[in-house]
Amino acid sequence: MAEEKKKKIISADTGEEVAAGSKKKDPKAAAPVGNATGLRVGAIILWVVAIVFEVLALLVFLGKLHINFLPSLAQIIIFLVLDLICVIIGSQLWKKANHIRPASEKNKLKFWLWNNLGVIVSILAFVPFIILVLSNKEADKKTKTIATVVAIVALLIAGASSIDYNPVSQEQQQAAIEAISGDVYWSPYGHVYHTHDDCQALNQSDQLTYGTVEQAIAANRTRLCSFCAKRDAITGVVTDDAD
Ligand SMILES: [Zn+2]
């Protein structure tokens, strides 16, 4: 029989390795999951800057803004890429904030808006540009075609990276916090958290992170491992099969 695989356990607080079995957490150390409000403010600032870049791209396209040292098509592409970068980073901050302080399911509109705001911003950051470029009769065909294609590709990338593939509600977060008292574990590429570091679903992982349920959800592990849920007879918490 193969000897048991030694697992490295990394603290979510310090990012440092702790020896298995000697895992001790200072009870004073509150879960530093980050500041949701700060992340939201950062997201909104980046999204506003993204729209500014969209307007700049449009002004160059319309010939209302001239930067001498670059051809205008290159300027348009650069502004669209900067637009895209701001949308993507803003959306990641927003999603992180949603996993720290999720919206309540009780307010359906706010819950939907909070979970889809990044996608909405992606549309605002590219679709007006696309419509105005396509409806322009004066611009040359090559510039129009390339600018439109770049903007559509950017729109698709922005939208895909803004979708929250693991959305969580305030109610789900609260239920998990109430049902699970101790630390939980997660692997670097896993998308669930575990209540046991020796869970069968973790057999492939040499490295584990431990922290509170809040930290796990903030780290984008929004669901509890179903094996661990069964083992601890935990009910009322959202679970998932694979690690
Ligand atoms: Zn598990």
Image (spheres, rainbow, N blue to C red):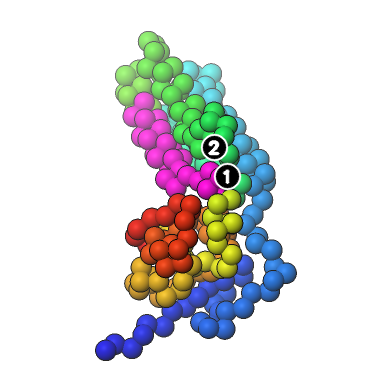
Left or right of residue 115: residue 152: left
The residue sitting at the left extreme is 1
Image coordinates for residue 157, horizontal then vertical, percent: 39, 39
| Residue type beneath disc 1 | Gln
Label 2 near label 1: C-beta < 8 Å?
yes
In front here: 24 or 239?
239
Q: Secondary structure at mark 1?
A: helix
Label annotation for residue 170: 1
Residue segment shown in magenta: 148-173
Instruction: Residue 52: name its quadrant.
Output: top right
Task: Determine whether 171 is above or below 129 in the image.
Answer: below
Image coordinates for residue 43, horizontal then vertical, percent: 59, 40
Q: Residue tagged by mark 2?
A: 105
Q: Secondary structure at mark 2?
A: loop
Q: Residue at x 36, y 85 (%)?
A: 4
The reply to whether residue 154 is in sight is no
In front here: 73 or 69?
73
Left or right of residue 134: residue 97: right
Query: How many residues crowd around disc 1 within 10 Å: few (fewer than 14), some, or many (20 or more)?
Result: some
Q: Main secondary structure of the magenta part?
A: helix
| Residue type beneath disc 2 | Glu
In front here: 239 or 69?
239
Task: Determine whether 6 is above or below 241 in the image.
Answer: below
Q: Residue at x 59, y 64 (%)?
A: 181
Question: How many labels were placed on the picture?
Answer: 2
